[in-house]
Amino acid sequence: MDDEVKYVRRSQYRLRVMRSLEGEVKMPSEIAVDAEIFQNHISNTLGQLRNHGLVECINPEVKRGRLYRLTPEGEKIIKSL
């Protein structure tokens, strides 16, 4: 888990996205506003966090209006930050 904490801390974008999703389910546009990050950076950051098992899309079958939340592992990491 320490490696994942370091991974999140190395990027302000990853840290902001994780904090925005803490206890929430949001669309990328909502995350962008909340985290004050441009939308195109949100998509890249969500992809990185998804690949590390920290974020999941709960409705991947839709093209628009996808919803994201922290995984249980992501919740543990955000609590330790």
Image: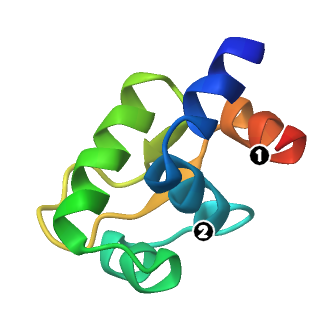
Q: In this view, does 4 lie to the left or right of 42?
A: right
Is residue 6 shown above or below 12? above
Identify residue for label 2. Answer: 20
Please report the residue visible at 36 percent of the width from the left and 47 percent of the height from the top: 46
Q: Is residue 1 visible?
A: no
Q: Tell me: 32 left or right of 55.
A: left
Q: Quadrant of the N terminus?
A: top right
Above or below residue 59? Residue 55 is above
On screen, residue 8 versus residue 33, left or right, reads right
- Mark 2 nearby-residue class (10 Å; few <14, some 14–19, many ≥20): many
Horizontal arrangement in the rendering, residue 37 relative to residue 38 (left or right): right
The relative height of residue 78 versus residue 52 in the rendered view (above or below) is below
Q: Nearer the viewer, residue 63 or 76?
A: 76
- The numbered mark, 1 or 2, whose residue comes first in the sequence reads 2
**Vertical side of 16 occupied by 76: above or below:** above
- Three-letter residue code for mark 2: Ser
In the image, what residue occupies the spot 82% across and 35% down? 76
Residue drawn at x 67%, y 13% as measured from the top left: 3
Q: Which mark is residue 78?
A: 1
Q: How far apart are marks 1 and 2 (CA)?
A: 10 Å
Quadrant position of residue 8: top right
Disc 1 residue type? Ile
Q: Which of 15 and 30 is in front in this view?
A: 15
